[in-house]
Image (cartoon, grey):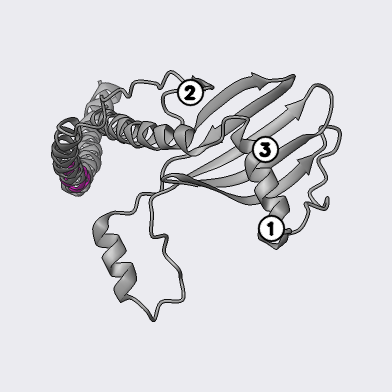
Amino acid sequence: MAFASILRKSANSLAPLAIRLTRVQRNYHSCIFTALNHSFKSQEPAVNCFYRNILHFSTAVDSKKASSDESLVRVLESEIQCAEESDDYDRVEDTPSEFPFEIEDTPGLQTVTLRREYDGELIKVDVHMPDLVTGDEQDEGEDDDGDDYEKPSKSSIPLVVTVSKKGGPSLEFNCTAFPDEVAIDSLTVRNPDSEDELAYEGPDFHDLDENLQKAFHKYLEIRGIKPSTTNYLHEYMINKDSREYLRWLKNLKKFIEE
């Protein structure tokens, strides 16, 4: 009986301690949970604000880009309409019956290639885009006496004429074709077995004897490089320039829209 009474007293004395320890542990876990929960909640607004700023900046940039692209497309469409209303872009010149060359015109290139065979020789002509001079530009050139740069007074097209024989060297003429006149600017002998950039290319063509100059002009004339040929090429290249400009505008518009 005495032993049982001792046990009851011990149990009664330990029970309040156990209850206090349990409450402390619960309060400890509750404090940790509250602190963590407060920490997470305090971080959420900062994270959300950061992403909102990024989203706002991205949206603003996209809006400006779209507005700029749309404006550019409208300007391109207006320019395309003006180019299509021109009479040059789709005009086809009838080739003269006496025109001695075959024309190789690849869309997208700024040159046209002419070819023909003449008495065992292969004649190739690279025709470049025309250098156009309008009436207004002629008047400005006459008034501007103080300018050291001499502006051309007439429209012209640059030509590179190559006359070659099978397995041998070739003659390369750099020419400028004006209305009713073909001027030779330089003359070079090209060796197919040598590509030395320091090779002697001869004197300035205009420093040659006048009779020699006339002889080379006649040399080109009988091979088809004459005013009746170049006058047709002048009109042909003006039309090609208009076609290529229109193609260029449409390619720009397509790129912007994609």
How far separated are the C-alphas under marks 1 and 3?
Answer: 14 Å
Residue 31: name its quadrant.
Answer: top left
Place of residue 211 in the rendered image (x, y in percent of width and height, measured from the top left): 71, 54
Residue that appears at 59% across and 23% down: 115
Q: Which label is found at residue 35?
A: none
Q: Does residue 56 show up magenta in the picture?
A: yes
Q: Nearer the viewer, residue 117 or 228?
A: 228
Task: Judge from the rendering whether residue 177 lies leftward or rightward of residue 131; answer left or right.
Answer: right
Q: Position of residue 73 (x, y in %)?
A: 18, 37
User: Which span of residues is magenta-colored?
Assistant: 51-60
Read off the residue under disc 3.
219
Classify 10 Å Cα crowding around label 2: few (below 14), some (14-19), many (20 and above).
few
Report the magenta stretch's main SS.
helix
Which quarter of the rendering shows the N terminus?
top left
User: Cα distance, mark 2 to mark 3?
Assistant: 17 Å
Find disc 2 in the rendering and name its residue: 99
Q: In the figure, residue 140 lies in which quadrant?
A: bottom left
> Residue 145 colored magenta?
no
Q: What residue type is labelled 2?
A: Phe
**Secondary element type, mark 2:** loop
Residue 109 left/right relative to 94:
right
Give the structural element (helix, strand or loop) at label 3: helix
The amino acid type of the residue labelled 1 equals Glu
Residue 153 vertical placement versus 166 (above, below): below
Residue, x 66% and y 19% (percent of image)?
A: 117
- Disc 3 marks a residue whose amino acid type is Tyr
What residue is drawn where x is 19% and y is 38%?
76
Distance from label 2 to label 1 (Cα)? Answer: 29 Å
Residue marked by disc 1? 210
